[in-house]
Image (cartoon, rainbow, N blue to C red):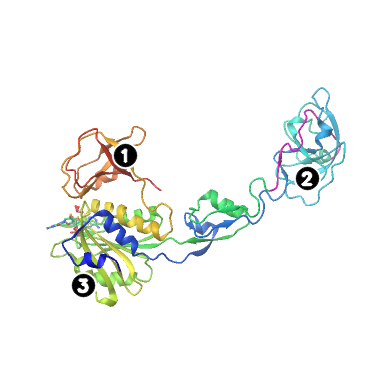
Amino acid sequence: MNGSTDRTSHPDRVWSVAEHLDDVLARLRPPAPVTRQLLDAQGCVLAEDLTVPLPLPPFDNSSMDGYAVRAADVAAATEASPAPLTVIGDVAAGSDELPTVGPGQAARIMTGAPVPPGADAVVPVEWTDGGTGQGPAATMRAHSAAPQDAGGEVRVHRPAAAGAHIRRAGGDAQAGDPALSAGTVLGPTQLGLLAALGLDTVTVHRRPRVVVLSTGSELVPPGEPLGPGQIHDSNSFQLTAAAREAGALAYRVGAVADDAKTLRAALEDQYARADVLVTSGGVSVGAYDVVKETLADLSSDEGRVEFRKLAMQPGKPQGFGLIGPDRIPLLALPGNPVSSYVSFELFVRPVIRTLMGHPEVHRRTARARVTEPLGSSPRGRRQFLRGSYDPVAGTVTPVGGSGSHLVKAMAHADALIVVPEDATEVPADATVEVIPLGHH
Ligand SMILES: Nc1nc2c(c(=O)[nH]1)N[C@H]1C(S)=C(S)[C@@H](COP(=O)(O)OP(=O)(O)OC[C@H]3O[C@@H](n4cnc5c(N)ncnc54)[C@H](O)[C@@H]3O)O[C@H]1N2
Ligand code: MOO
């Protein structure tokens, strides 16, 4: 394919973060777009350019409850010398039979109702006596309570210019205008527009189905007591939640013991429902690192997963490949909770965003002043510390140390602090790159 074949022949090669990410993203094959009901497309990315099929609004209509009039009839109206008009009927929203408004006439009209022929302005009811013969009206009387108000006389107290309080057909969008372009994320207002345009389905990139599987014989599910040497499986929850937040449909598989046969069977079970497989644990150099042991030696028709060392901390050991009959991308993340989360952020999230056609594949980064000195970053490795970022002050404060087991500190952080490969420490007040971990 490209240089990657050559590079993989050197098992000691250390990959930069960017090299690994580029390699992973280059090997993805985004699935074909699907057509969905509007509410099933929420949060998905539009896969087609959409054109406005009909004008919005579709017809001239009133923006106020009031009276449809001829502007010339009310040009001289004042409260002291109102313009009396004969009310010829009501026009409610949804009316299809419209009275024609002649000189000296008015039709009572409701917000959103079509402007009847002959009328060229709407006066709000507050500018009239509401047909009561009294002073200015605050409101109309309900038709059920006062049917006579749809007839009789109304006194208009103020002039209205031609076109006043009329929302013109096509004033929002004309037929043939671009409505939304491919790549738009469909949120509430975009779905509202599609519905307003009369579209009941839409073609989108579907959310990838991500299956998260943690490995480790020491793991017990939360809710169960710990035996000697055991810990609770937190990675599978953290990674599944992170995959959902990134936009995927994510499924969590309970922890699999450090046994090659079990792991292989657990992975094969997921082939039918996964677009992406994510494992945690078992990728370093220990005697029970079962993910590596199982996946490094797949037969050629089972796919291929490569294990690499990356120039980063945490997250040094990583596995990536395409496995199973459908060649599903599999990312094998290191087991330390901070390592797996940071690896998710850097590699799995961009995979999800790429597969879902998202316009923003990568997190936005920012520059911030670090409020405390940062020490002991390994030379030659890009370090990702956890921090608390204040975008208003433009500062970031480290939360906890660099240990990749510090789950509590991570839960109190809202950003990653990036210490470049060539730095081993960073003085207070220096400017650093931060990756805010927001919800979009
Ligand atoms: N001799 C060496 N040892 C290690 C190296 C190395 O280069 N030489 N690398 C270290 C680094 S860096 C990392 S990161 C870890 C990666 O280890 P594994 O991916 O094999 O992960 P495990 O050994 O399975 O677990 C590591 C650690 O994380 C805990 N863990 C695992 N899964 C979960 C989970 N689902 N929920 C919560 N915690 C989990 C596990 O109990 C271990 O404490 O290797 C270093 N070692
Ligand atoms: O490089 Mo390992 O990922 O923490 O601590």
Residue placed under numbered mark 3 in the picture: 297
Would residue 257 be seen by someone viewing this image from the given angle?
A: no
In the displayed structure, 75 sits above or below 190; it is above
x and y percentages locating residue 196 in the rendered image: 62, 52
Q: Residue at x 36, y 48 (%)?
A: 363
Q: Earlier in the sequence, mark 1 or mark 2?
A: 2
Nearest the viewer among 439 and 412 is: 439
On screen, residue 292 versus residue 206, left or right, reads left
Residue placed under numbered mark 2 in the picture: 91
Which mark is on residue 367?
Answer: 1
On screen, residue 322 versus residue 197, left or right, reads left
Does residue 360 belong to the magenta stretch?
no
Q: Extreme top residue here? A: 80
Q: Nearer the viewer, mark 3 or mark 2?
A: 3
Q: How many marks?
A: 3
Q: Quadrant of residue 283?
A: bottom left
Q: Nearer the viewer, mark 1 or mark 2?
A: 1
Q: CA distance from mark 1 to mark 2?
A: 59 Å
Q: Earlier in the sequence, mark 1 or mark 3?
A: 3
Q: Residue at x 76, y 44 (%)?
A: 115
Tell me where the magenta segment starts and ends, as one range: 151-169
Badge 1: few (under 14), some or many (20 or more) residues near its Cα, within 10 Å? some
